[in-house]
Image (cartoon, coloured by chain):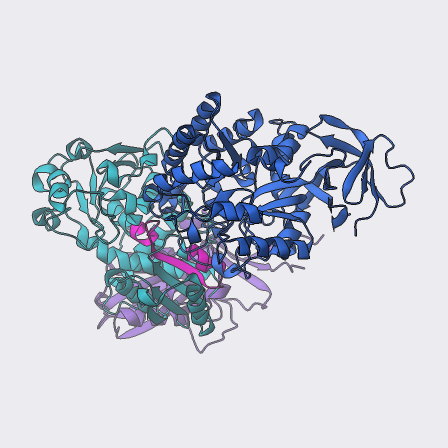
Chain colours: A blue, B purple, C cyan
Amino acid sequence: MAETIAVRGGRVIDPASGHDAVADVLLQDGRIAALGPDAGQGASNVIDASGLVVSPGFVDIHCHLREPGFEHKETIESGTLAAARGGFTTVCAMPNTEPAIDSAATVRYVLQAAAAAGNARVLPIGAVSKARKGEQLAELAELAEAGAIAFSDDGDPVWDAHLMRRALEYARMLGLPVIDHCEDKSLVAGGVMHEGWVSARLGLRGAPAAGEESMVARDIALAQATGGHVHLAHLSAAGSIELLRAARDRGLPVTAEVTPHHLALTDAAVLGDPQDEAGLAYDSNAKVNPPLRGETDREACVQALADGVIDCVATDHAPHATEDKLCEFDHAAFGISGLETALALCLSLVHDGRITLPQLIERLTVAPVRALGFALHVEGLGMLAIGAPADVTLFDPDAEWVVDPLQFASKGRNTPLAGRTLRGRVVATVYAGRVVHDGR
Amino acid sequence: MKPPPTAQVVLSTDDIRRAIRRIAHEIIERNPDLGRLVLIGMRTRGVPIARRLAEAIRGIEGAEVPVGALDIGLYRDDLSRRSLKATLQPTDIPSDLAGRRVVLVDDVLFTGRSIRAALDAIIDFGRPESIQLAVLIDRGHRELPIRPDYVGKNIPTNANQDVQALLAEIDGRDEVLVTARVEVE
Amino acid sequence: MTTQPSPMTPLEERPAWKRRHLLDLDDFSRDELESVLSTAEAMKEVLSREVPRVPALRGTTIANLFYEASTRTRSSFELAAKALGADVINVAAESSSVKKGESLIDSVRTLQAVGASLLVIRHWQSGAPYLVARHCDMGVINAGDGWHAHPTQALLDLLTIRSHLGDVQGRRVVIIGDIAHSRVARSNLWGLTRIGAEIVLCAPPTLLPAVFTADDPRALPAVTVEHDIERALDGADVVMALRLQLERMQAGLLPSLREYAHLYQLNEERLALANPGALVMHPGPMNEGVEVSPAVAHGAQSVIEEQVSNGVAVRMAVLYLLARGNGA
C-alpha cells in the first residue's frame, strides 16, 4: 500500500522538464503529487535528501533476469532487488530464458513474478523468433498484447537477414522496435575477447570489431528499407558508432544503447594486475559479449553518449552462477553482473567532465524510454512529472565505496570490479511509492 | 640501542700464512705420493685456501697438485632455512677420482653438516681411495661425527658467536674474526 | 678442471629469488633470467656426471599434470625432477574427460592433498595455469598453455643461443612459422627482447597477429615483421623454425602445406642467406619437409638436439628455484 512520502531538500534533477534545483518531491498513492521548494512541508513520512541528488527512477532497457529456467543464476525477485539497489525502478527483461519469452503465457509469468516481488517494474521483451532459434517469427502481436514492449533474440543476433527484414516490417505494424544483438558469428568464430593487442598477447582467440560493425551496417540498411525501428543493443566498437552517426544524420529510425562497462573498461581488464604474481590475468569476470574493446572504442562510446548519438545507457546485466565463471577462460560464460555498479561507472564520466550530471541522468531515465518508444505504455515513465509513477532514486554522486560482490543482492557475483573503490552510490530507491531500497 | 658488536681478530695475516704453510707440510708428510693427491676447495672461501695450499706444496716439493671447486648447494639438508640469495655456482671436479686421495679444504669447521654434504657430493663423482679434511679454523660444536685431519687453529667459541674468515682473493685482506651475534628482538 | 682463478661472482649481491610460479616470461627482469640461466649451467654440470643425481629436492613431490599429449616436454620434466631427487606423480588427463574447469581445479587440489608441492601443468587452453595458481597453494610451472606461453622452452632456447653466441645484445633472431598460434614464439619474444636481441617475425599475414606490427604504442620496438622469408633471413644470427600447428589451425588460414613449404621452408639455399654459422633451432617435434628441410634439420648449423638436452638442465634449474621460492 503506497504511503505519502516527502523526499525533502535534495537536488532534484528531472531531465524531462529541465528542473535542477534543491526542492521537495511529494509522493502520494503511488504517483508524483507535487514538486517544489516546500512541497513536502507538513508530511509525516519524510525522507531527508539533503546533500543527495533526487532523480526519476532509472530505467534499464536491457537486463537478463534469467527466470524462468536459470534460477541458479538469478530470479526475478533477486534481479529486481539488485535493480532497486542500483537505483533502477524499471527494467526490461530479455527473453533468453527457458522457455524463451516467445509466448503470451511466459510474458504473463514474468509480469506476475515481478509483481509478486514488488521491487521494480519489469517490462518483458518478447523473442523475435520461436524459441529464439532465428528461423521462424514468433507470434509478435500476441506477445505485444500480453505486455511485451519490444522484440529481441538477445544473447544471439537475428542472424538471418531475411528474417530480420520481416521482423522489422511486422513489428512496425505493432509500433514496436526490434532490438538486435549485432554479432556476425562467422566472423567472431569463437572469439572469447576483443581481437587486439591483449588477445594476441594472452593467446586467446579474438572477436574482431568487424563482427559487430558488419551487422550494424546490415541492420541500418534494413531500417532504411523497411522503415522499421531498429534499436542496436550494447554497442561497443568505434566503427559501429560511425555507422550509427551517419544513419542518424540521414534521419533513419535507428536508436542505440551502451553499457556502463563499455564506457569505463577496456580489454586491459583481462590482463589483470601486474603486481599480483598469479594476478587477475585471464579473469573470466571480464569476459562479456560484446567484449570489452580497446581504448579507441571506449572513447568513441563515451563521446557518442555525451553528444547523444547513442541514446541511452543500458546495463546488459548478465548474472551467472559461480561455477559458470570459475573455469578456464575459453569455457567461462559471457556476462557481467552490472545493476549494482552501473551508476558509479556512469558517474565516472561526470567526474571526468565528459558529460554533465543532468545529461547523464537523462541517459538513464527518459532517454531509454524515448529510445524504445514505450512512453505509450506507462505514462510519465522516467520523469518527475505530476501524475507520473512515484519512481524516485536518491543518490550521493561522491560517496566512495568498495565493491564486494558477496554483498550484492544479485545472485550473480561476476564482476571485474571486485575490490575496486568506486565513487557514487545509490542511497535510497522508491518504486511505485514504496521504499524498495534503503541504504541510509 | 645496543653497542655495535666488537670483532676480535683471532688470526692475523701472518698467522694465516704460517698456518697454511704448516698444513702444506703436514699434507706432504702424510701423503708421500703427491701424484695421486687432489685438493678440493669448498665454495666459496675453501677454494682460495686450497689454491694457496697447492702453491705452497709446489714451493716445497715442486709438485703440481690439481685443485677443484665444490658447490654443496644441491646437497644441503637445510634447503628451506637457507637464505634465498645465494645462487649455485658450477662444481669443477675431475671425474676420475678413483684411486686418488682427496683433501677437502674449507675455511671454518663448525657443525660438520657442510662437510657431510661435501662427502655425499664427492662420492657421487667417484670413489676416491680416501678423503681427508683440512680446515683453517675449527670452532667446535660438532653435530655430526666429523673430524678434521689438518687444522690451522682451534678456536673454542660460544654458540652465539660468529667466526668469519676473510681472504684477500675475496675480501681484500687476510684475517679471521670472532664477533658476538647481536640479538634480534 | 681449473688451475686458474675463475671469476668470483659476488653471490650475495644477486637479488633474492621471490617467485612462487613460472607462468610466463613476459615480466621477468634481466636479473631473473640470468639467475635461471646460471643455475641451469650448474645443473648441466650435474647432468654430465656419471651419476647425474643430487639430493637437493629430496622429500619434495612434483606433480606433472598434462592435458595435452607430449612425450618430449613431459619426460624432460620428469628427468629433471628425478635428477634433483624429487618424487614425481604423473597425471595424463584425457582431454575427452575434461569437460569444465571445475574438474581442473578439483584435480589440482587432489594432487595438493596427496602432498605435491610443485605442479607442472600443460593445458590446451590459454590461461589455465593462472586459474590453477589462483586456486591452490602449490608452486605452478607452465609447461605450455594453449597459444599463450611456454616459458621453459624459451629459457632453454636462450641457454642454447647464449652457449653458442655469448652475448645476445643486438643479435638478430628470426622466428618463422605459425606465430599466431605459437606459445613458443610468444615466450621467446619476451625472453629474447629482454636480454637485448632483435626479433624478426616471418609468416604469412594469416598466421601473424596484426597487432605485433608497429602502430600500437605497446608494440615492442625490437620486433619487426616480414612476410618474405629471404628478406627476413638477411643478417640473421639465429633462425628458429616453428612447427606448423596442424592441430590448432583453423581451416582457411593456409591454402595447403605445399604452398607453405614453397614459401617458408627453411632449406639450405635460404639458410645461406643468413649470417655464416647462424644457428638453426626448432622446438620440436619437427615436420621435416614442411617447415624445415631434412638437410638443414640435421645439418652442421642445427642445434636442435642441444635444445633437448639443455631442456633438462633448464627444467632442473626452474624446479630448484621454485622449490625455494615456495619454501619447499
Q: Quadrant of residue B88?
A: bottom left
Q: Residue furthest bottom?
A: B145
Spot occupied by residue A68 in the image (x, y as percentages of width and height): 54, 59
* Left or right of residue A218, residue A365 in this image: right
* Left or right of residue A439, residue A125 in this image: left
Spot occupied by residue B111 in the image (x, y as percentages of width and height): 49, 71
* Left or right of residue C78, residue C255 in this image: left
Whether C146 is among the magenta residues is: yes
Residue A43 vs C245, above or below: the answer is: above
Q: How many marks?
A: 0
* Start-end of magenta stretch: C129-155
Question: Can residue A274 be seen by looking at this rendering?
Answer: no
Residue A437 vs B153, above or below: the answer is: above
B89, A139: nearer the viewer: A139
The residue at 34%/51% (across/down) is: C151
* Left or right of residue C163, residue C56 in this image: right
Q: Quadrant of residue B43?
A: bottom left
Q: Residue furthest top?
A: A249
The residue at 38%/40% (across/down) is: A195
Spot occupied by residue A409 in the image (x, y as percentages of width and height): 65, 54
Whether B68 is among the magenta residues is: no
The residue at 32%/59% (across/down) is: C315
A245, A252: nearer the viewer: A252
Location of the N terminus of chain C (image quadrant): bottom left
Q: Residue furthest right?
A: A42
Question: Can residue A333 be seen by looking at this rendering?
Answer: yes
Residue A372 vs C111, above or below: the answer is: above
Residue A435 vs A395, above or below: the answer is: below
